[in-house]
Amino acid sequence: MALTAVAGCAQPVGNAAGDATLPIAALSSQGQCGTLNRPAVRWIAHSGEWRDLYARANSQWMDSPPPPVVDFPRAGVLLIAMGQRSTAGYGLALADDVAAVRDGILTVRVDWREPPPGRRQAQVMTSPCLLATVPAADFTRIQVVDREGQVRLEGER
């Protein structure tokens, strides 16, 4: 599993209306996320919740490394899960190194990879997910969009 360092000094850039551009960094992007079998977007704001989610996402590995350190409460972790899929070829990655907050909605752009229609794929159960860190900001909803701007997931903080 690939891990990246989290910049603790990153600050949101925004205006008085609460709109902001926030740095976002991937902590993990995997094709098998343990027991995370349903599509979901979720904000994790506490270390205990983070440890539990990380263990759940890595439950298929015998010797999972400890969760990356996150500077709670200055930042949080965003879980984006595609849910269970019956073939190979699905995956998630960040499309940008920033997320946007506008009108109380955190919007994150992702590469939402799906196998091409009609193409043969290995018949194997997958459960792709992406874990990313984002500075804490003032938002109440979360929206995940693909590169074409199609809303793929929505959730509440």
Image (cartoon, rainbow, N blue to C red):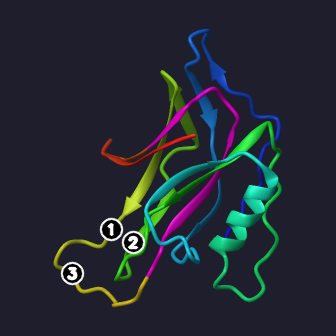
Q: CA distance from mark 1 to mark 2?
A: 5 Å
- At horizontal 62% and vertical 33% (from top left) the residue drawn is 22
What stretch of residues is rendered in magenta?
126-143
Find disc 2 in the rendering and name its residue.
90
Secondary structure category for the residue under label 1: loop
**Residue at horizontal 78 percent and vertical 86 percent from the top:** 63
The relative height of residue 109 versus residue 60 in the rendered view (above or below) is above
Q: Residue at (83%, 45%) from the top-left corner?
A: 71
Foreground residue among 157 and 136: 157
**Residues at discs 1 and 2 in contact (Cβ within 8 Å):** yes
| CA neighbours of label 2 inside 10 A, class few (<14), some (14 to 19), many (20+) | many
Image quadrant containing the N terminus: bottom right
Name the kind of residue labelled 3 in the image.
Arg
The residue sitting at 38% across, 81% down in the picture is 88
Please tell me which residue lies in front, 89 or 64.
64
- To which residue does mark 3 refer? 119
Q: Looking at the image, do the residues carrying marks 3 and 2 touch, with CB atoms under 8 Å apart?
A: no
Q: Which residue is mark 1?
A: 114
Do we see residue 1 in this rendering? no
Q: Earlier in the sequence, mark 3 or mark 1?
A: 1
* Left or right: where 73 falls relative to 131: right
